[in-house]
Each structure stands twice: as structure tokens, then as C-alpha cells.
Amino acid sequence: MTSIGLESTLLCPEKGVVEVEPERPISRRFVFLDGLRGIAAIWVVLFHAHAGNHLNNLAEKLPAWIVWGVFELGHLGVAIFFVLSGFVIAHSLRDAEVDGRFLGRFMLRRSIRLDPPYFASIALVVGLAWLSARIKQEPYSLPSTSVVIAHLCYVPGLLRLPLINDVYWTLCYEVQFYLVFCILLGLGQRLLPSKPRAIFIPVATISLLWGTGLLPENLLPGLFTNLWYGFLLGVFGYWVWQGRLPKLVFVIYAALIGATACWRQDAFAVVCCITACCLIPGANSNWLNWRWVQFLGAISYSLYLTHNPISGASYFILRKYLGESALSEFFMLIAVIVSCVVGAWLVWFAIERPFIRFAKRVQVDSASPAKSANIA
């Protein structure tokens, strides 16, 4: 799925580069957010290694709590991505005056930032799947034109079409998050110019229907509404950190979601709440400022997008030579993680990083070029 970027994230592939504001001196980067992003990405990689039945013998030798926490819960890295995306997008649009032109250029900038690595990962998935079928002498059908177009527009879930890569659903959610948040912010500025963020009060109240489990099902498959609360937790966390939202509002919102999530044993919602609560004290800190964690944060979007096809190909090759014992699966896991990281770094270096730089050239706010240069 970030993205869960995806920032995203997915997923969220946002990078936490920020402009220093005079009233609140902070470091040039959200170091803690980048570190969390890297950890979340690796957690998802470990989850898919286990979910793909590549670690069955190793899992039998490990303590159950390690298997559960390190591998089985790895999908919760997506929850971290969603909250981080909300925090960083709220920062990106902190002083923006949203109108139709701004929205269009903002989404163009998002597209330049997100699309090239995403499209490259689609080609990688299809290419490796075709190659695998040829090697195994199995039939393989390329994705249909409608499926490809739906992916290019981030709507396969909404159209109920199959995903080319299981992780892509989070990118579809992330794009919806960005678009709806930007639109709501613009509406708030038009309808409630003195307190534009007040428009999110009814929105947040509606999101509690899913955040507290009152509505267990989504309105429409592939629609963002059922996980909107995770993104909003990040947004509200940023506004509290910046002093633009009363802490009590955030506490009530997070407490309602967190308490009901514990009662329902909804680990996704619990992780969303914990992440949001950690961001408020952690945003201005040097927590997780370790070189390798920060490196993983930098390549997290590419790692999230490409780890499934790379790990699948790596396991296919390694298993032929190392067998299926617990010890061999341990070494295969290390080798696969290294392969995924190296592959992600190549995609980041050759594709993602150049387009990040190019996206920054797109002026979003015509009234303030300097300010628009800092809008991610």
C-alpha cells in the first residue's frame, strides 16, 4: 500500500524538510518523523516476509511474542504512515490560502512527487512477474488496460479492480486524504475566515463513526472514510504542536478512538493514537536520529513500493541454494532485507530524488513564491 508514501508516506512518502519559523525555532528536518517512517517501512517488509510463508521454519524456533510483534503486526506500519502524512501535510499547508488554482498546482506537485516511483514500481512488479512465469514455464497475463489506467489514476479500489501490488491500496487512500483535506481547508477559509479549521469539527465527528467502531464497514470499497481518522490524528497533532488547536480537542478525539480501539482490540487504531501522541513531543526532538534509521526514512517510499516484487524474486533464488531450514530462513531474511533496501535505494537515487527536486520547482502559491517553495 504511502503509502501507506505512502511520505506515504504509504505509505507516505513525505519528507520532513521544513522551514524554520521565527516563533518556534526547530531543526531543518522533522528527524523523529523520518525515523518513524523508516521503521514503519521495514516493519511492513517483515510482515510480508512472514505473510508470504517464507519464514515458517524460523517462526517455529522463535518465541511467540517475537513472531507476533516483529512479523505478524508489521502491517501496522501503514497506521504510522497515515498519521505521519496528516502531520506533514498539515505543516505543508499551514499558511496556504487554498483556491482552485492552488488546489490544482498542489495536486500537480503531489503527482510529480509520487507518480514516477509508483509507475516504476508497477513496471517492476509486472516485469518480474512475467520473468518468473517464463522461468517456471507458467502462463501469465499482463494486467488489462482498464486495470493499468485505474492504477495510474489511483482508483483501482474504488472501481473494484484487482491490485497489481497489494500495497497500492494505501497510495489510493493517501491521494484521497490529500485532496479532501486541501478542499476542506479551502472551504473553511471561505466559509469561516476567522476560524477556518473549525470546519474540521463536524468532519472529525463523522470520522469517529469508524474510529470508534460504530460503523465497521466502509461506505464504498476503496473509499478513504473508514481510515480518515488516522490522517486526522496526524493533522490535529500538528495543529496542537503548532499551538493552533486546543490540546483538549486532540485529547478527547484521540481518547475516544484509543479507548474504544482497546476495547475492540483494534490494533490499527491503537497504533494511530500512539503515533499521534508521540509526534507532539517528538516533532521538535532528535529522537531516532540514527544514521541507518534516517537512511531508511529517506528511501521509505521506494522501499514500500518495491519490496514485494524484490523480496519475492530474492526468496525464489535463495531458496534454491539454501533450502528451508530455520537457519537458512534466517540468513535468507537478512539477504532479502538487504536486497530490498539496495533496490529501494536505486529507485530513490535514480527516480525518486530527482523528481522530489523537480517538484519543488512547481510554484503553488503565486502570491508568495518563497513560501510555496516549502510546500511539500
Image: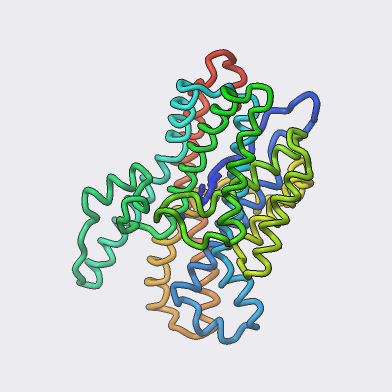
Where residue 197 sits in the image (x, y, percent)? Answer: 65, 32
Q: Is residue 9 left or right of residue 149?
A: right
Which residue is at the far top? 367
Q: Residue at x 47, y 28 (%)?
A: 358
Where residue 293 sits in the image (x, y, percent)? Answer: 65, 53
Please identify the quadrant where the C terminus is shown.
top right
Q: Residue at x 74, y 33 (%)?
A: 244
Q: Is residue 284 left or right of residue 164?
A: right
Q: Is residue 132 left or right of residue 53?
A: left
Query: Vertical placement of 215 versus 10: above or below?
Result: below
**Is residue 345 in view?**
no
Q: Which of 76 and 33 lies nearest the eye of the viewer?
A: 76
Q: Which of 248 and 144 lies nearest the eye of the viewer?
A: 248
Q: Residue at x 64, y 41 (%)?
A: 235
Where residue 230 sits in the image (x, y, percent)? Answer: 60, 51
Query: Vertical placement of 165 versus 206: above or below?
Result: below
